[in-house]
Image: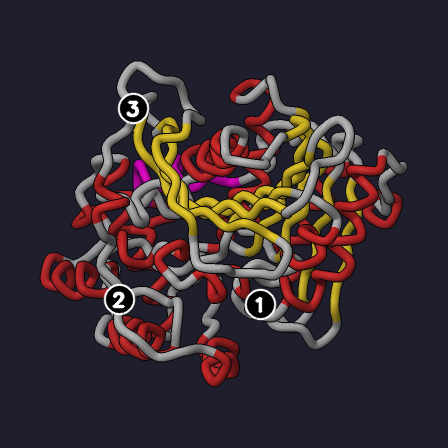
Amino acid sequence: MKVFTAALFSLLPLLTACGVPAPGAFYQTPALAGMPAGKLISAAPLAPAIPGAASYRVLYNSTDIDGRIVPVSGVVFIPLGPPPAGGRNVVAWAHATTGIAPGCAPSLAPGPDVAASIPGLASFISAGDVVAATDYQGMGVPGVHPYLVGESEGRGVLDSVRAARTLPGANISGNFVVWGHSQGGQSALFAGQLAASYAPELHLLGVAAAAPVTDMKGEFAEPFSGDSGRLLGAYTYYSWSKVYHVPITTVVYPQAVPRVDHAAAQCLNNIGQAIAAIRAGAALNPVFLSHVPVGTPPWTALFEQNSAGLMPPGAPLLIVQGKADTTVEPYWARGFVGKVCGRHEIVDYVEYKGVSHLRIADRAAPVVTAWIADRFAGKTPPDNCKDFD
């Protein structure tokens, strides 16, 4: 996983500068004890975020990797007007890396900013689909975000669909598709893998992923040589040391731990946050890893555990990838597609020349929204696995 600094700063003029917000009282409500995953804890209307839809900030029960019920926050958009016969379909959006601290949650932003961060949202609302967008565990709500921990992310995505069911006007059919980018691409793939066993009452019709993180062991094998790469490394090792109860000093020099802690507190939602985060990554220069994590127990097994594709996704896949991506390089996407095609799954793989990591989800949005509409319409999914024979 190489650096994405240049691509990040190319987008900074599009963002609004501000500091890291502090989650308010809404996010402090504990999980509903004795209630199942997916149970809605609370909901609060957002200021109008997108024409033709009601918008809600939500808090709902989910399940952490130890099987405990925990609160997770997010946003749900519901089209106005009467639902179609049979109910509304749901698009579950899984966001890319925004940080790992509670204040990095996308739902903390004003409604229009949250809406602008979801590629294809206007098309989904126009089609009459509900859109559920999780923050993931430990973002918004207190606690540690299990960054790139596929099982936690996937459960958070699936429970966001369940939570949307009881909101006014939702009238959900039970059919859904998952759509995610980067970290969210990994989240989407894990949601697909978990759906049949974790949420059998829902009907998964497809998984769309832009530049998904798929091979953790391979992508983290290279030393982090840039400021943004070191930042992503700090996110990962800080988070996993907490989630998996592994001393961070098994891979990080003790004297570098305070700087890793500082980097882990930074977010990437806007220009001010991004500049502070990259500076925190620069403070880890030149070396903060004492050992190569890929070859250091138990990190090797954890990388394998959190690599997508270990179980069938259970639905057609669409993978979109920028050929100019230097963060999650096309090599990894092609390798993943080859692996799942080898299991005789249905996969449509589309590459975009000259498109970077941060731009791929927006660039591919028209293709993704059309593909999702076709899944809801029951059309035969495209499959170009023959190109990977």
Q: Which residues are magenta?
A: 296-307
Residue 361 rendering spot, x and y as whole percentages: 63, 62
Q: Secondary structure at mark 2?
A: loop
Earlier sequence position, callout 2 versus callout 1: 2
Which residue occupies the foreground of this view, 232 or 63? 63
Q: Dot 2, how many residues are within 10 Å of its Cα: few (below 14), some (14-19), or many (20+)? A: many
Q: Residue at x 38, y 33 (%)?
A: 60
Is 251 left, or right, of 228 in this rendering?
left
Q: Residue at x 27, y 19 (%)?
A: 33
The amino acid at mark 2 is Val
Along the line of sight, the residue nearer the viewer: 48 or 77: 48
Identify the mark at residue 152; answer none if there is no mark: none
- Looking at the image, which residue is at 67% across and 66% down? 322
Given residues 252 and 209, the one toward you in this image is: 209
Quadrant housing residue 156:
top left
Name the residue carrying label 3: 32
The residue wearing badge 2 is 20
* Badge count: 3
User: Disc 3 or disc 1, which is closer to the eye?
Assistant: 3
Is 19 placed above or below 76 here? below
Circles 2, 3 touching at the beta carbon (< 8 Å): no
The kind of residue on which mark 1 rests is His
Identified by mark 3, the residue type is Leu
Q: Earlier in the sequence, mark 3 or mark 1?
A: 3
Q: CA distance from mark 2 to mark 1?
A: 24 Å
Decide if residue 259 is on the left or right side of residue 44: left
Q: Is residue 305 magenta?
A: yes
Residue designated by label 1:
357
